[in-house]
Image (tube, rainbow, N blue to C red):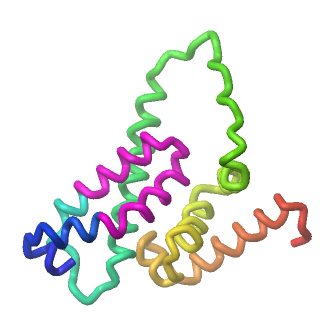
Amino acid sequence: MRRYQQADREAASALIDRLSPRLFHFFLAQVRERSQAEDLLQDLWLRVHNSRRTYRFGEPLLPWIYAIARRVQIDAYRRSSRITKHELQSERLPEPAADCSTQGASVRMADLLRDLPATQRETILLLKVAGLTLSEVARATGSSVGAVKQKAHRAYEALRKSFGGDS
């Protein structure tokens, strides 16, 4: 990141190549549409590029990037909700997509995560999909470690109930 801040193109390419898959999966789990996730990822890298000077060397990089990713996702949600508020509703609903057996468990998990409140879903995605620590998730979401633990615990309880387990 320090080399990227000093306008090293190779460092920028390496950073993008290394982190894009993780960030893409984070966005894909949020929006569930590949094209939207790609758009969010591109918007993220534009924001990272524009705010690269604000990164403080020595601080953990992933929470800084995931904080930006979180803002990108929130801004996209707000933008889309403003647009859909003003759209006209169609009389006919589109046909449902065919169930693809190759997606299997990941689709079921995505459905279970979709039922969680947004803050709990985001916490689980950051902890389990992105692989961040509790303190990194707290830093990325702007909350305390205790709040992250509480959101994760409540999410785990809700998922356990979804699987038919006792809480």
- The picture places residue 130, in percent across and down from the top left corner, at 50, 70
The residue located at (78%, 69%) in the rendering is: 157
| 32 drawn magenta | yes
Q: Is residue 91 left or right of residue 159?
A: left
Provide the residue span drawn in magenta: 17-46
Q: Is residue 164 left or right of residue 5?
A: right
- The picture places residue 93, in percent across and down from the top left corner, at 64, 17
Q: Give the quarter of the figure containing the C terminus.
A: bottom right
The residue located at (42%, 72%) in the rendering is: 140
The residue located at (45%, 69%) in the rendering is: 141
Quarter occupied by residue 4: bottom left
- Please identify the dominant SS of the magenta region: helix
Question: Residue 101, relative to residue 57: is it above or below?
Answer: above
- The picture places residue 114, in percent across and down from the top left corner, at 65, 51
Question: Residue 45, relative to residue 138: is it above or below?
Answer: above
- The picture places residue 83, in percent across and down from the top left corner, at 41, 29
- The front one of 10 and 86 is 10
Residue found at the far front of this picture: 102
